[in-house]
Amino acid sequence: MTRIAHVSAAIATLDRPEALARCLDALLSGAVLPAEVIVVDQSANDATKAMIEQRRAGAVPILYTRQQRRGLSASRNAALGQVSCPVVAVTDDDCVPDPGWIAAIERAFASPAAPDAVTGRILPLGPHVPGTYGIALRQSRVRADFSGRVLPWLVGSGNNFAVRRDWFARIGGFDERLGVGSPGKAAEDIDLFYRLLRAGARVRYEPESLVYHQRHSKAKRMTTRYSYGHGIGAFCILWLRRGDLYALRVFGHWLCWQCKDLAVATGRWQWLEAYQRWLILRGTLSGLIYGLRVAAA
């Protein structure tokens, strides 16, 4: 028998009605369901809206909003601004939540010393297909609690997290200068976790909170690598311009990590890996330039 949790779910989408349908079907197939699903759509046509209409008769209300303001961060802010539950779980339209996803999130927030936000495992969707790659994976099975100043990419990823609604409002939501569809290209989740921890929130990585992420082609992986670097560069410089010197440590760790992996891959003649690291570093430079321009505006 299914049960409704006092947890909202939020999904931003753009021109992927089939992928979103797959995500929704998985989300609504568990034994513990969200109280509501908020879908914010930036698509160019009505295919996504029509797909949502076909699913409105279920036990869980699906609230659909068309969003004119561009960017993933803008869509997520719009979605989280509509939730009615004290906790909201967020995933992406190209992800497939595990049937126990909502139940795991509910347990985490009800546990002793409950966190203010929860992240989780991200595994590649389906069997490996030659020429495809897992993206933004989180595979550790070890629970971890984070507080204070830590490297934000250790905490989790934006396609599998949940947060208390009051904490999301307290820190001002996502920075809409960052993220897919914005000039910042990425790192909106890194920035969100950074601000949560900076404000004193406790964040838990909970491996039982599991989603599967669609594999990407080689070309898409390369584009994503550049965007990740760009987002990190922008994120770091925006915080440095605010006088937060911990961002300098974050940037130093990031730069050393990428340069080390580039050197190792080059020394082993692993040209694909070396090229990816070069793309990340190139993106980081462009992100620094973008961040300086934005901060100076």
Image (spheres, grey):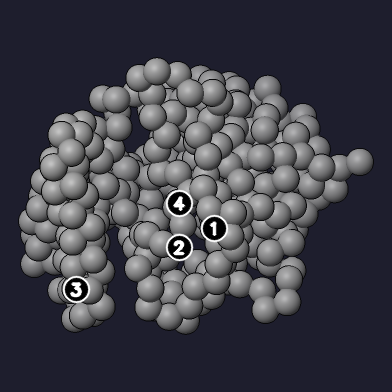
Return the residue at label 4. Answer: 158
Q: Amino acid at mark 1?
A: Thr
Give the CA distance from mark 3 to mark 4. Answer: 23 Å
Q: Of the numbered discs in the image, which one, if any, rests on residue 166?
A: none
Neighbours of disc 2 within 10 Å: few (<14), some (14-19), many (20+): many
Residue 65: x and y in percent read: 52, 40
Q: Amino acid at mark 4?
A: Gly
Residue 23: x and y in percent read: 59, 32
Return the residue at label 3. Answer: 248
Q: Pointers 4 and 2 in contact (CB under 8 A)?
A: no
For this view, does 158 lie left or right of residue 280? right
| First reached walking from the N terminus: tag 2 or tag 1 | 1
Residue name at image x 13 percent, y 40 percent: 266
Q: Could you say whether the residue bearing mark 2 is in a helix, strand or loop?
A: loop
- Along the viewing direction, whichever of 49 and 277 lies nearer the viewer: 277
Q: Pointers 1 and 3 in contact (CB under 8 A)?
A: no
Neighbours of disc 3 within 10 Å: few (<14), some (14-19), many (20+): some
Q: Could you say whether the residue bearing mark 3 is in a helix, strand or loop?
A: helix
For this view, does 71 lie left or right of residue 100? left
Neighbours of disc 4 within 10 Å: few (<14), some (14-19), many (20+): some
Q: Pointers 3 and 4 in contact (CB under 8 A)?
A: no
For the N terminus, the image quarter is top right
Q: Could you say whether the residue bearing mark 1 is in a helix, strand or loop?
A: strand
Q: Is residue 195 visible?
A: yes
Q: Amino acid at mark 2?
A: Val
- Along the viewing direction, whichever of 42 and 17 lies nearer the viewer: 17
Residue name at image x 63 percent, y 33 percent: 24
Return the residue at label 2. Answer: 155
